[in-house]
Image: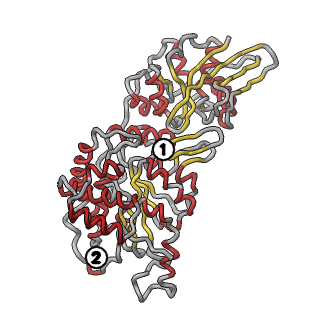
Amino acid sequence: MVAHVTTVAFQGVETRPVDVQVQLSNGLPAFAIVGLPDKAVAESKERVRAALTAIGLALPPKRITINLSPADLQKEGSHYDLPIALGLMLALEVIPSDALDGFLVLGELGLDSKLAPVSGVLPAAMAAMETEKGLICPAACGPEAVWAGDLEVLAPIDLLTLVNHFKGRVALARPEGVVAQDTDGIPDLRDIKGQEAAKRAIEIAAAGGHNLLMIGPPGAGKSMLAERLPGILPPLTPKEALELSLVQSVAGILKEQGLATRRPYRNPHHTVSTPALVGGGQRAQPGEISLSHNGVLFLDELPEFNRQSLESLRQPLETGKAVVARANAHVTYPARIQLIAAMNPCRCGHLDDPDMACSRVPRCALDYQAKISGPLFDRIDIHVDVPAVNPVDLSLPPPAEGSAEVAARVKAARDIQTTRYAGVTGAKPVRTNADADGTLLEEVAAPDEPGRALLADAATKLKLTARGYHRVLRVARTIADMEGTAQVRRPHIAEALAYRRIRPTG
């Protein structure tokens, strides 16, 4: 007899069905797991054996073979413990032969038979929903699983509770969905005194979903401005919340196993490796760019990042996806992010201050800013200078306008874009002006004649690339949306051009 239990293997946020086949046969006692298991799966036999012993069930002195099918698919993670244990219990006729029909199973076992939480429960639950199955998972993951839809979810605290449920002694109730509670407050824009031009740029970036680069001396407030951006962004839509929760579930960082409610803000250190930034590693985990999906990725001290890591951002910024290539598989994670970057104008940071600048000016600035490649620089919509704060501004009272007032204007502009792009289809969904491609921009952001003439003249003098030309149109379209203007006009083009910095060359 061969017992069958269904579970899944993860490839990014996608799942592949795995058939856990359990066979007990005569021969020398052995416990073998085949089907390309990794170390965590291979070690599951010891956890399973101890967990079964904890509930008073001893394995017979037979040859036990566990086959994870398809055999050519790499199996990674500890969530195979529960399917293997239940397969053994089916083979031993401890639970009814039809108990697991119509269920997808995943969970990690402790030596005392308690079920420990595992990552990836939400995508597994969605896979179960699509195949009209129920889901069996640890109790801690139950609130996460029910967000997949109206499916049967069994979330026992331990193995014995699940056995009693199958035998009719205990009835497991369906878990209640939980929304993650964010206890960390978001700083308010009202805390920043002065820097009105930079605040304006932050508001435009938030309104249109644009990438932003801030250049200024140390202590000018670049990091403070970036930290306050999530506070003026619109709330996550239900679709965006589910997309983000899928990534966080696979990464194992979903708060309280509840649906995400706040746009993420990630701030990796400049020593971050390329796999940690874009995704990869031994198990092809999502990187910072995917953990920032539908939110903000802030890169402080941009030139200090590894050149290879920065160049790896170029494709995800265009496509909204991070592709992790491995020898045996290609894993794709969503990565629709808003890149906010900050840097000093030169290595010493005081390029514009003759009293503090180093003796290598302007060579110092040229060498430092040249660490950012032209193609990456071109993919950033808005470049804004953040000068040193005037000490007089610090003594002034806080500004009357804070994050709440700015967020209201940002939401109004986003609502206009949502209506505009509601019927647009394509390879990459268009939700904001930053997502619009060249053909669409010519339709929705066509400027008036004075604006067109100004843009054409500026494109020639500034030597704008085609990408740079369209990014000016995107920013101008956002500025017009913030004013509630149907057509892009010359003043909108002029302001957008002011945010297009000419990259210094050696």
Judged left or right of residue 196, residue 77 is right
Kindly state the secondary structure of the residue where label 2 is placed.
helix
Kindly identify which residue carries mark 1. 253
Name which quarter of the figure residue 116 lies in: top right
- Residue 2 shows in this picture: yes
Kindly state the secondary structure of the residue where label 1 is placed.
loop
The crowding category of the residue bearing disc 2, from other C-alpha atoms within 10 Å (few below 14, some 14 to 19, many at least 20), is few
Q: Position of residue 317 (x, y in %)?
A: 44, 53
Image quadrant holding the N terminus, namely top right
Where 76 sits versus 84, above or below? below
The residue positioned 68% from the left and 23% from the top of the image is 67
What's under tag 2, amino acid-wise?
Leu
Kindly identify which residue carries mark 2. 394
The residue positioned 52% from the left and 20% from the top of the image is 162
The residue positioned 46% from the left and 43% from the top of the image is 334
Name which quarter of the figure residue 171 lies in: top left
What's under tag 1, amino acid-wise?
Ile
Along the line of sight, the residue nearer the viewer: 85 or 284: 284
